[in-house]
Amino acid sequence: MGQLIQKHKFHWSQRAFAISVVLGLLFLTISLIINYNAGVYATANASNAVTDILLDRLPVWDVDFVFIDGALFFILFMATLLAYKPQYIPFVLKSAALFIIIRSVFVMLTHIGPVTQTSPLIINNINKFFIFGGDLFFSGHTGLPYLMALIFWDQKILRGIFIFISIFAAATVLLGHLHYSIDVFAAFFITYAIFHIAERLFRRDYEYVLKA
């Protein structure tokens, strides 16, 4: 615990680090606002559902708990991880924000309607700001854990955990018919590109990761 406190003191005492974290939080907040408006727009303009080679052969599973509560557990896991590895905070915040913004652009460009029969989801006052129905391409549940796997790639255990979460999330949204198969498979390729864009855009923040 003493080493962890010293680690936090070391990083937060650096003005550039503290400013970068604040900018990361601001960037993330803006990205969430953009995501909300993109989701509302795409859902309001959604067209009809289309056929899918996988979904047409898969039964619909009830994945409400995994889809919604699993995402909350993932956020808590990330918060705990960053508390133990503060040097990753600026790059993770900015990379996640970039991921959300780029996904929002794709969401606004793609208006395919949701699958006709899907897993029932319990929408409350909180998750209604993140779950819309028409925000399909590409799968955030699949892509975001994979982005974390790329960020923590040099740490074998964490890499394995995040890849497992990403694949598990991919299976969940497919079994629940909450995403088309293209939303899931494309997420890996697009996320890989996003990581390398973030690596270049936020080079100084990525240097903290390289020194970890």
Image: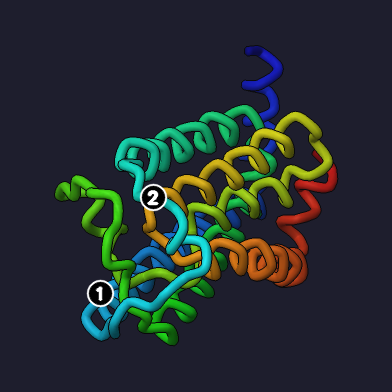
Q: Where is mark 2, residue-wise?
A: 59
Using the rendered image of the protein, determine whether residue 111 is visible from the camera's viewpoint.
Answer: yes
Q: Is residue 19 left or right of residue 117?
A: right
Residue 199 spot, x, y in % from top left? 75, 64
Q: Residue at x 59, y 46 (%)?
A: 166
Q: Is residue 208 left or right of residue 45?
A: right
Instruction: Examine the rendered structure and indicate whether residue 208 appears above or below residue 107.
Output: above
Crowding around mark 2 (Cα neighbors within 10 Å: few <14, some 14 to 19, many 20+) is some
Residue 63 spot, x, y in % from top left? 35, 41
Q: Residue at x 64, y 38 (%)?
A: 164
Q: Residue at the top extreme?
A: 1
Q: Earlier in the sequence, mark 1 or mark 2?
A: 1
Q: Residue at x 48, y 38 (%)?
A: 74
Instruction: Examine the rendered structure and indicate whether residue 205 appears above or below residue 61.
Output: below
Using the rendered image of the protein, determine whether residue 19 is visible from the camera's viewpoint.
Answer: no
Give residue 40's mark: 1
Q: Amino acid at mark 2?
A: Pro
Residue sitting nearer the eye, 157 or 136: 136
Which quadrant: the N terminus? Answer: top right
Give residue 21's mark: none
Residue 23 spot, x, y in % from top left? 52, 61
Q: Residue at x 41, y 42 (%)?
A: 71
Instruction: Examine the rendered structure and indicate whether residue 168 appears above or below residue 55.
Output: above
Q: CA distance from mark 1 to mark 2?
A: 28 Å
Which quadrant: the C terminus? Answer: top right
